[in-house]
Amino acid sequence: MMPITLANKGDTVVIRKITGDDKIRQHLAELGFVVESRVTVVNEIKGNLIVQVKDGRIALDRSMANRIMI
């Protein structure tokens, strides 16, 4: 497993684990980041990501993205 920040632009990956306390995991789940779901890395700028989740795009800062393991 590795954090999603290490994925390349254009990669579609499967979420394997989400780390952090319950509040953070719940917030990410509400945004659509759940285990076994597929997300696509749209763009990366200095570790910050824009990812395609279902029908929407979400921007994540590096610290939040590092909690999503693929």
Image (cartoon, rainbow, N blue to C red):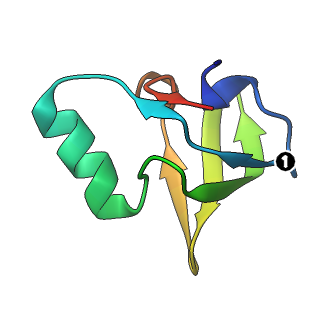
At label 1, counting other C-alpha atoms closer than 10 Å, the crowd grade (few under 14, some 14-19, many 20 or more) is: some
Does 50 sit left or right of 64 as displayed? right
Q: Residue at x 65, y 46 (%)?
A: 14
Q: Residue at x 52, y 52 (%)?
A: 59
Going by the numbered disc 1, the residue's amino acid type is Asp
Helix, strand or loop status at disc 1: loop
Residue 29 spot, x, y in % from top left: 30, 54
Q: Is residue 47 visible?
A: no
Q: Residue at x 66, y 27 (%)?
A: 5
Quarter of the rendering occupied by the C terminus: top right
The image shows a total of numbered marks equal to: 1
Q: Is residue 56 visible?
A: yes
The residue furthest left is: 23
Q: Quadrant of residue 38?
A: bottom right
Task: Return the residue at label 1.
Answer: 11
Instruction: Look at the picture and state if 16 lies above or below 59.
Output: above
Does 32 sit left or right of 30 as displayed? right
Does 57 sit left or right of 10 as displayed? left
Q: Quadrant of residue 22?
A: top left
Q: Residue at x 43, y 25 (%)?
A: 67
Residue 3 spot, x, y in % from top left: 60, 22
